[in-house]
């Protein structure tokens, strides 16, 4: 019977799960819904049900049983504390997963984007955090803990929230005008500021638009050189830079080697204005003048990092090249 590894990148909106054989060949790649316990009303209990559905679906369609899995790597949003790690680890064991690595999804971008296997990844998807792995295998996560870590400056509907408040504060609190107002008024088909709050709530309550749909208006306004929108993106870039700098300070990166930093998640990958990335790059570089720093947007799917990690744990050499080549050959 065949032997396999499984890698999973689980988020608050979308999940990727991939199965490879131990020779480094792609068996399957599945796109699923959310697998972050914080996104479920039923919390951990509902997460367990969802994971069971996902595992059953993937294993059945590939005619694989749990005993065929040598090792699994799960990078899940919402694994931010030891308690969360312990609870979800127990869930995985109860579902029959025997040998696995469980971590925050931020770490997957490092394995997927840094061929050496260590570096830093800043994620900006449904949630946001920064993870780091140094050449000694030490790991640290900065951010991602809500108000405890200074709030979620990035991720999900962060920019949408800033867009709404910028418009509201401009209309009613005397703060600077922004063209985000015109963009939103046009979409909502309103002319009066007194209709703004009700109109926004109406389209959200009716499900006409998802909250994070409105992120794009900050980028659009920034492309028009709107000072308020540019300020919002600057703040996001600065906060991410602080987290990245904290990772560098708290881990042991070899001074003779470049520190690779990859940026993952929709707001970094699909953002239509580079201002936040430019600001991030500036503040990280200024803080680390004597270090060789490389910052780039992650081109590979983060789930690729989970598979690479699993194959490495199994003892497969050149796992990065094997997995990347498989994803390229399958046009993933």
Image: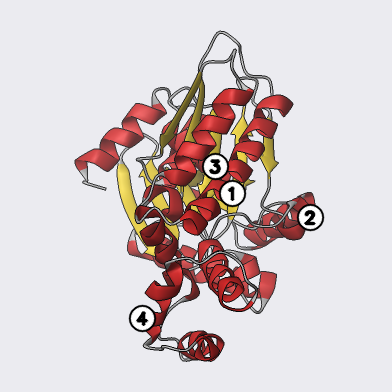
- Answer with the quarter of the image where residue 251 lies: top right
CA distance separating discs 3 and 4: 32 Å
Q: Nearer the viewer, mark 3 or mark 4?
A: 4
Of marks 1 and 4, which one's residue comes earlier in the chain? 4
Percent position of residue 298, x then y: 40, 39
Tell me the element at label 3.
Answer: strand
Q: Which mark is residue 187?
A: 4
The residue labelled by disc 1 is: 235
Q: Nearest the camera: 186 or 6?
A: 186
Of marks 1 and 2, which one's residue comes earlier in the chain? 2
Left or right: where 202 falls relative to 42: left
Pointers 4 and 2 in contact (CB under 8 A)?
no
Tell me the element at label 2.
Answer: helix
CA distance separating discs 1 and 4: 26 Å
The residue labelled by disc 2 is: 148
- Rendered residue at 62%/71% (across/down): 174
Pointers 1 and 2 in contact (CB under 8 A)?
no
């Amino acid at each position: 019977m065949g032997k396999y590894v499984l890698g999973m990148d689980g988020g608050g909106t979308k999940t990727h799960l991939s199965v490879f054989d131990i020779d480094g060949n792609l068996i399957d790649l599945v796109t699923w819904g959310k697998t972050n316990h914080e996104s479920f009303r039923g919390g951990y209990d509902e997460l367990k049900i969802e994971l069971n559905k996902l595992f059953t679906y993937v294993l059945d369609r590939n005619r694989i049983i749990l005993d065929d899995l040598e090792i699994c790597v799960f990078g899940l949003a919402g694994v931010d504390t030891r308690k969360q790690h312990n609870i979800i680890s127990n869930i995985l064991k109860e579902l029959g997963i025997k040998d696995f690595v469980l971590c925050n999804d931020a770490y997957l971008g490092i394995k997927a984007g840094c061929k050496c296997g260590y570096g830093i990844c800043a994620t900006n998807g449904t949630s946001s955090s920064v993870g780091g792995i140094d050449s000694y295998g030490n790991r640290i996560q900065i951010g991602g803990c809500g108000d405890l870590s200074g709030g979620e400056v990035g991720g999900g509907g962060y920019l949408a929230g800033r867009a709404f408040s910028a418009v509201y504060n401009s209309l009613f609190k005397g703060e600077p005008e922004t063209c985000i107002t015109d963009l939103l008024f046009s979409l909502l088909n309103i002319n009066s500021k007194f209709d703004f709050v009700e109109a926004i709530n109406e389209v959200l309550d009716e499900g006409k638009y998802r909250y994070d749909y409105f992120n794009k208006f900050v980028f659009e306004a920034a492309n028009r050189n709107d000072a308020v929108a540019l300020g919002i993106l600057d703040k996001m870039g600065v906060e991410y830079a602080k987290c990245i700098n904290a990772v560098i300070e708290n881990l042991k990166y070899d001074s003779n080697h470049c520190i690779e930093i990859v940026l993952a998640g929709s707001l970094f990958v699909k953002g239509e204005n580079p201002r936040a990335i430019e600001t991030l790059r500036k503040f990280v570089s200024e803080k680390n003048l004597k270090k060789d720093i490389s910052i780039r947007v992650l081109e590979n799917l983060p789930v690729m990092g989970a598979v690479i990690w699993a194959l490495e744990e199994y003892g497969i050499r050149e796992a990065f090249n094997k997995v990347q080549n498989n994803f390229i050959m399958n046009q993933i």
